Image (spheres, grey):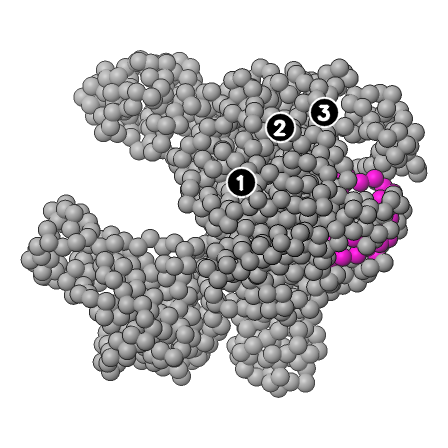
Amino acid sequence: MNSRASKVILKWEIVESSLMTSVIEQQQQNATSGATSPIKSAATIQPSAFNQNNATPITNTVSPKVRLDSLGADQPPTKRAKVFEQENVLSGVQQSDKIEVDPPVGNGTNSQQQQNSQKNNGNNMSDEKNGDVLDKNLYSRQIYTLGESAMVNLRTASVLISGLGSVGVEIAKNLILGGVRHVTIHDTKTTEWLDLSAQYYLREDDIGKNRASACYERLAELNDSVNVEVSIDDLSEHLVQRFDLVVLTDTNRSVQIQVSKWTRAHSRRLLVADARGVFSYIFNDFGENFRIDDGTGEQVREFFIEHIDRATGEVTTLENLFHGLEDGDYVTFSEVKGLDGINGIEPIKIVVKNAFKFNIGKVAENFPDYIEGGRCRQVKVPHHVTYKTFEESFADPEFVIWDYAKFDYPPQLHALWTALYSFEEKYGRRPAPRSTSDAALLKQELKGDVEISENLIQLFAFQASGNLVTVSSVVGGIAAQEAMKAVTHHMTPLKQWMYLDHVEALPGDWTSFDNEKLTEADCQPRQSRYDGQAAIFGWPYQETLFKQRWFVVGAGAIGCELLKNMAMMGLACGEGGLIKITDMDQIEISNLNRQFLFRKKDVGMKKSECAARAVTSFNSDVRIQSLAERVGADTENIFTDEFFDELNGVANALDNVDARRYMDRRCVYYRLPLLESGTMGTKGNTQVVYPYLTESYSSSVDPPEKEIPVCTLKNFPNEIQHTITWAREQFETFFAQPGEVANKFLQDERQFNEHVEKLAIGQRIQILEQVKDALIDGRPSNAEDCIKWARQQFQELYHNNIAQMLHSFPPEQLTDQGAKFWSGAKRCPHVLNFDPSKDEHFNFVYAASILRAEMYGIQPILEREEVIRVALSVTPEPFKPKVGVKIAVTEAEAKEQAESGLGDDDAVVEALKLKLARLNVKTLQKLNCIDFEKDDDSNHHMEFITGASNLRAENYDIQPADRMKTKQIAGKIIPAIATTTAAVAGLVCVELYKVIDASGIPKVPLDRFKNTFINLSLSFFSSAEPIAAPKKKYLEKEFTLWDRIDITGPLTMEKFIEDLQRQTGCELSMLSAGACLLYSFFMPPAKRTTRLATGVREVFEELSKKKLDDTVRYIVLEPMMNDPNDEDVEVPYIRYAL
């Protein structure tokens, strides 16, 4: 438990007083000694005693006493379940042997919670109302997705989740990871074999036990800042009214109707979700006038103004930049000259005219004339949405479309789900797998006049006994995000029904497992954990899954979810099966918020190893091997031809484009299916790359990110992003680059000088000056020198450089055209004078001095007063303008300056070399090169960058940023949240179902695959079949990127060329392998004769200057060829077998 956690309060109303006293005394001793209490939150009696070693229930009865002898003070904190005394129970049975305890702290509304948040520049944000402290390191990626105010709302919310089947556990897992303050899991059902197919926190020894009790401890350990409680009684109005949100899963229709009445009566919100086989749905009822504070969750738009026409209300952006606004958005203005009264005006609703113009109406018509300048900022204005009650919406449903190719499905599935609930209440069971008689009975339960095909009715009935972890992952991820919307009022909830299906996952006649031909016998339950999946796909399919061999690349958030899904599917859970996973990264605190296989005790350990170990707790049958290697050209001796030849497919879970493209090339080369995916906040996408069928990941390229112009970054910043990026560069300039360059000099002076001689003279001077400053002029002898250096840097960066700028371009400077130089996006700066009483002034010098000391291996001075004393002892020389300094105003000038370097004086180079030659390099210690690490708050990296950025922002009158925002921009952090990850990983594994066959890779029709894009913030879902691999042609032969020319060696170049020309009917003009040119038509005759007589392997090794490893079986060659008409033609690449 975190040391900042609130004090533990015990309420043991029926525990023996002596035992209670001893427990409290032990807590007091712990509090005095600083030890952590072994009991988390308000301790109460559980419905079952838990074995603390394996966290599984050892009894399923309620005992009036609880044993505490298994709890030692040195054990990690555990959570205690709460059992509520129930009233108005649905069944009418009053439970009398339960203990009444305090309810969750839900107040039913979060409208005022945003006012309770405290924003600061530290790592924690506290809500004084409930004493909670938000761990910004843990939740950082989620805060970047939701925002701090939404996160505060989560930390005060209470949610009841009823039904701990596959969908319920997925929602619970995501909400607990997300940090919902109070989560109560409820269930009255006991564990069955069917549950084990997809409920990953249940075990075989939980059969017959209450589902909520059985998985309670496993859910509770996901996040020790969340109060997780359990209830096992029938739902009651008394229980429901205590929560902000009630989530119902795996419940019948009559319960849904009754609970919906209770939630409406007490102004609570309701979410219903369920899944059967490949079908699932979500329903929301968030009441009347539900407030939405931010409909999109996107960053607000901000831009400069070129002109405001007060008469017409038309606003034009500076230089016709894209404003990104939509009709109905609200904006406000600042820094406008003229139009007195418009700066800081209340948000104005706008109408968009085009991409760079919008209209504000008559707001400014009575203001004075517009003069110049100004900034416009979008404002998120809350709006309200009214939801129909459950019964009203059921009768007159409003649908969110899941798949636009099946526009007619929602009303049909609405009727089928109703018929299914009716069937189950009438017969007390689900329709049996592949039972045509049960399908007929289900049809009889259909009501209304919706036309539904016999095929869909039968297909739906056949799915009713299915339980798929993949589908639960999708619907559970989406539903959890909807739950967050309900309690945070952040982002647009779906309204009100969404029906999902994945019927394309069912095998067709292109495989050995045609779903149409399955019989009841093929799908009968066997009291196996795979019963729920075999009910859909049949046991022969399941047994093939056992033998699969897959490679998962990356063990981050998506990687963890993929492993969970694969293990529960039974992938690689039999003889010959194997999952290989690789990830070179180590676990960090910020990972724990969504990478749910990891715990705090795992921080610092290898992700792949911990993930492989953790996933076996879901299914002990899974066969998994962990690696900790990067995938790339430098590890092809590990990921060899043999490695890939054994695989059935690859699933990427990577966080960078280069690695994705590399694996894409590998999969195309080895002709393996690749399941690609990615997330960014609430957005996610999946892509299927399938042999001979689809384009590859690399076939399409995203447009490059817009870079900040160099002149803007160095001289004319106008946004906080500019100053943060500049500060990040200063970090490299001060603490990374000098060490790297100086250490190369110290390591091998001769080799260093040889390298420098190859550079342009300007670059030579720059590098030699850098080494001279690092080892001679600027080398500190003690910690005080480091403080003085930091103080001098403050003077240079924030005073002298700005003064030089103002000397070159005074505030009243005009351009050659007579316009004001300091106008538009150019903000006129002002100098700063060092004042240690100002936080950022001190923080910059403090952090810079510590990092400088670290670089030189000196113990830094950490006492604030001493740092201030030394800093104030520095008396900077008065500023004197430099003569001949040219400041780049345009990007062209900045580029010209960068290329021209520092000069072209050979004498300067020789003088620098002479000074460095006098150094005794053997006596000098190497410098510590400081690599930027954003997530370690003890290393002062972010403290320096935040201070440096905000000081520059102060120079230019730009609004500063706190450390959280600075970290995101400086660290290029991609927002992330567990809900999106779960949904995306589920979609990936739905596609995995489609590539399974008993004999290799099936010839799946293109339209069975789905590439999907989701945006959970807007409840937007789009899927389409992958783009087919483009066909190319030479002579009369068609080919795609999946085709190649195979030639088997060993051959001489001459024989190789003969074979190639025979296969293609074309003439070879050039042949290359990477950067090596093996053959060309313009070679000198003598060289060509020699080359043709040499073996292909020998030529390759000679040109690449390295001997091929024994593990290499093939080399890839790229030919350029001419057809019989001497026209250039493109042919496939060549795989040459050595």
Give residue 194's position: percent from left, percent from top: 72, 28
Disc 1 on helix, strand or loop? loop
For marks 2 and 1, the one nearer the N-term is 2
**How far apart are the two marked residues, 3 and 2, measured between alpha carbons?**
12 Å
**How far apart are the two marked residues, 2 and 1, measured between alpha carbons?**
17 Å
Marker count (numbered)? 3
Give residue 60's position: percent from left, percent from top: 71, 37
Label 1 crowd bin: few (<14), some (14–19), many (20+), radius 10 Å: many
Q: Is label 2 in contact with label 1 (beta carbons under 8 Å)?
A: no
For mark 2, what is the residue? 569
On screen, residue 438 above or below 927? above
For mark 3, what is the residue? 536
Give residue 1026's position: percent from left, percent from top: 61, 34
Measuring 54% from the left and 17% from the top, which residue is drawn there?
A: 575
Measuring 68% from the left and 18% from the top, which residue is drawn there?
A: 539
Which labelled disc corresponds to residue 1031?
none
The stretch of residues the image draws in magenta is 239-264
Disc 2 on helix, strand or loop? helix
Which labelled disc corresponds to residue 597?
1
Amino acid at the residue labelled 3 = Ile
Quadrant of the snapshot with the C terminus: top left
On screen, residue 176 above or below 190? below
Classify residue 891 as left or right of residue 207.
left
